[in-house]
Image (cartoon, rainbow, N blue to C red):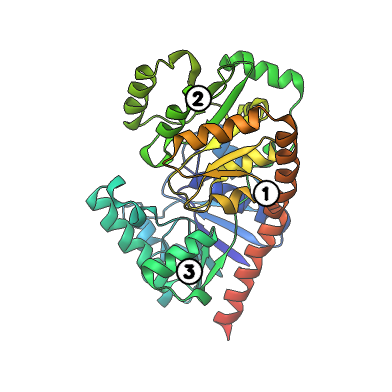
């Protein structure tokens, strides 16, 4: 097969949708080298992480023949036809307009519908554009890949999508989280980022939906020996978080890290005593998978898909109850037996997100879509 991908995120985003796109294409190329993988993008970000990906065997970068801001929406179809693409996969919520009339079958990945669940966190114009693109893709793609059962339920609820059109294919995380870093590397990372000896960890963009404020409010009631390390990009919400930190006198107990090299993240996870993720809503929750593979206990919020990511042996609390969150964290920190059990059960559970198995599921979808299209 010749498979084309909307590669804008893969070639430009260093986190989130970029990681999802690169990982999927990379593992397809590794496990199914008999196919050709074309990555279509209007531009390429100059970064070592992206250059490494684009140099992988079997992956071909495709830039616009005729650049323009509508290329991904309209102009790309001519290149897909010229390259004799057998199937197109929109990796982040959209497909080219009119592709259903081109003779090229399509698949679209929908990560979440948070802009509909929590519209107040998005501008009116953004919501309008997102809904147009998402609805169009879901209506006209031959198959929809949802990254969780939670996202599948949202698609059925908001778009009235036929459940038979949706396949749930979970995400894994980068393989670097799946093996233990050596002591020398961990100590080097600790010194480089001035990490405390004992800390709980939170990873993710510092925005309202991620709900870091609740963790800050829980911190005064958490064992004083432990600091909180927050890894993530700052947004305007960070100002509110900092006000709360100062109000509660917690400045010495909270450490923010941003622009952390990806290679350092596995060590940071593995040195943490617990991972805490109180997000109000997620499409899936990759940081939880990273934490489980890193062998640390997870405490997360109820209300979206985080139970899917963390399994039954992680702990879950309401995203609005900071007192219960503090109790749950202390329960893990003060009970080595419980923490050991959570680590072992977490590592066992996270095997369901094995990279090879998830990649095989995606290939089965491609094969089925192409077969149905040829009938």
Residue drawn at x 61%, y 69% as measured from the top left: 365
Secondary structure at numbered mark 1 = loop
Q: Position of residue 367 (x, y in %)?
A: 63, 72
Q: On the image, numbered disc 1 is attached to which residue?
A: 57
Q: Which of the two labelled residues, at mark 2 and mark 1, occupies the earlier sequence position?
A: 1
Instruction: Give the spatial CA distance, label 1 vs label 3.
Output: 23 Å
Instruction: Give the spatial CA distance, label 2 vs label 1.
Output: 52 Å
Secondary structure at numbered mark 2 = helix
Q: Residues within 10 Å of mark 1 (few under 14, many from 20)?
A: few
Residue 81: which numbered mark, if any? 3
Q: Position of residue 270 (x, y in %)?
A: 68, 29
Left or right of 227? Residue 244 is: left
Vertical placement of 369 versus 268: above or below?
A: below
Instruction: Give the spatial CA distance, label 3 vs label 2.
Output: 61 Å
Residue 221: which numbered mark, if any? 2
Any part of residue 84 in sight: no
Residue drawn at x 69%, y 36% as measured from the top left: 294
């Amino acid at each position: 097969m010749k498979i084309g991908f909307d590669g804008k995120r893969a070639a430009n985003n260093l986190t989130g949708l970029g990681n999802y796109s690169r990982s999927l294409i990379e593992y397809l190329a590794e496990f199914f080298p008999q196919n050709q993988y074309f990555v279509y993008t209007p531009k390429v970000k100059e970064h070592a992480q992206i250059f490494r990906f684009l140099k992988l065997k079997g992956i071909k970068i495709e830039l616009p023949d005729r650049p323009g801001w509508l290329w991904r929406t309209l102009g790309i179809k001519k290149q897909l036809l010229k390259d004799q693409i057998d199937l197109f996969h929109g990796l982040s919520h959209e497909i080219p307009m009119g592709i259903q009339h081109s003779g090229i079958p399509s698949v679209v990945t929908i990560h979440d519908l948070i802009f509909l669940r929590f519209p107040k966190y998005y501008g009116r114009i953004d919501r309008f554009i997102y809904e147009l693109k998402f609805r169009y893709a879901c209506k006209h793609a031959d198959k929809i890949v949802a990254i969780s059962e939670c996202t599948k339920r949202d698609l059925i609820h908001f778009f009235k999508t036929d459940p038979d059109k949706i396949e749930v294919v979970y995400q894994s995380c980068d393989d670097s989280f799946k093996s233990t870093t050596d002591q020398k590397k961990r100590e080097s990372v600790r010194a480089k980022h001035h990490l405390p000896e004992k800390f709980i960890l939170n990873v993710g963009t510092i925005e309202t939906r991620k709900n870091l404020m609740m963790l800050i409010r829980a911190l005064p009631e958490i064992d004083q020996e432990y600091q909180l390390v927050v890894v993530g990009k700052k947004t305007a919400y960070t100002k509110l978080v900092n006000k709360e930190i100062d109000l509660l006198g917690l400045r010495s107990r909270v450490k923010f890290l941003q622009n952390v090299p990806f290679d350092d993240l596995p060590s940071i996870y593995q040195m943490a005593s617990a991972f805490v993720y109180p997000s109000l809503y997620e499409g899936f929750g990759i940081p939880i998978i990273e934490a489980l593979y890193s062998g640390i206990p997870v405490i997360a919020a109820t209300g979206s898909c985080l139970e899917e990511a963390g399994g039954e042996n992680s702990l879950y609390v309401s995203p609005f109850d900071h007192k219960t969150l503090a109790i749950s964290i202390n329960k893990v920190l003060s009970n080595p037996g419980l923490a050991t059990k959570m680590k072992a059960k977490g590592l066992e559970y996270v095997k369901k997100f094995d990279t090879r198995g998830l990649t095989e599921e995606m290939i089965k979808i491609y094969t089925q879509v192409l077969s149905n299209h040829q009938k």
